Image: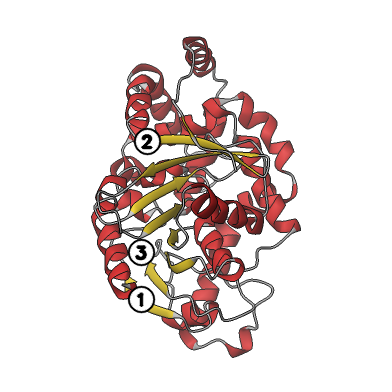
Amino acid sequence: MQQPTPFTIAFPDEQLADLKSRLRHTRWPDEPADAAWMFGTNLGYMKSLTDYWLNQYDWRQAEARLNALPNYKVQIDGVDLHFVHRPSRKPDAPALLLLHGWPDSFYRYHKVIDALAEDFHVVVPSIPGTGFSQRTALPVDKIADLFAQLMGDVLGHDRFIAAGGDLGSVIAMSLTQRHPEKVTGIHVTDVGYPDHTTNFSVLSGPEQAYAGAIQQWFFAHGAFNLVQATKPQSLAFAMNDSPVGLAAWIMSFMAGMGVGDEADARFGRDELLTNIMIYWLTETAASSFRLYNANAMQPPTIKGRNTRVPVAVATEAPIPGGVRLPREWADRQTAGNVVQFHDMEGAGHFAAWEDPQVYVKDLKSFALLLS
């Protein structure tokens, strides 16, 4: 097994100059009157964000902050993986694997790494196909296998807690099925959603309400999922060529999670743009889209056998018109292995990023149950 090597993020000035030129020469679309966010990303918002991106945002400052994290790379089974590894000062602290989704990145966890390292050996990888990992799209089960090797064979953590949201939750659940002997427990903010495989006749009243809200959300906001699962490469040409196009696509998803114009207040423009820049500078838009296709072709293994791995669920605050994930659905999806179930009051889909103190507290309380 290859040993990890320190990694420094460094993009040439020419690449940043090219970005500014593309931003200056954006060809803006028109927009229906009073469109707001009804048809996708709002034109006025994107013009304002692009002006800030061009004239105020400083990638070099963001790059320096990212490089203040202990970044590494290693090759496992022919796949180059990027990860952050912040060991705790407590030698016998448990290991913690933090798993992001789309359209965020390992940057989702930048506000919690130091606080969690007080009690955990923290590992935050970039999912293959995103960020600074190799531009290759893999099914979730393969990603879970790679991360199990990263934690055990590479870093020497024979047992670990896995935590995640969005796609990260799915990877964590796959780990419980494929590597239960290595997983002490998982902490997730979602546990998969009702879909065509669900037997709706056996769902409780709260589960039925939740399923209806999820179905409504997919009708209103889920086009990205279908496009990326079926025609990811058609989308990729535009997103790899236009930074504003990529940013608008990502911000459309943020709006679909109930933030829209509130995104600036909840995350800050600098942080929103740093996440977008990670996709733009690494040219991982195309490969990140193909993750959806890979998992449509080979659905993840998240249920099947009861492996008795303890589960904590910290439910995200629902979007306007949404319904909070009910305990019954969490129990159904995890074979009844939920040992901690908390509703987060303000944190949404990107909990560690939106409300880091609440997220850290919830993870630490789960770890105490496992000790």
Residue 91: where, in percent of width, then height? 29, 54
Residue 28 shows in this picture: yes
Give the Cα distance between marks 2 and 1. Answer: 32 Å
What is the distance, in whole Å, between disc 3 and disc 2 at their CAs? Answer: 31 Å
Judged from the image, the secondary structure of the residue bearing numbered disc 3 is loop
- Picture coordinates of residue 264 (x, y %)? 33, 40
Sequence-wise first label, 1 or 3: 3
Which secondary structure, mark 1?
A: strand
For the rendered model, the colour scheme is: secondary structure
As rendered, which of 251 and 326 lies closer to the eye? 326
Tag 2's secondary structure?
loop
Residue at (54% x, 74% y) in the render: 212
To which residue does mark 1 refer? 341
Mark 2 vs 1: CB contact within 8 A: no
Q: Quadrant of the N terminus?
A: top right
Residue at the disc numbered 3:
317
**Which residue in the structure is indicated by mark 2?**
70
User: Which quadrant of the rendered structure holds the C terminus?
Assistant: bottom left
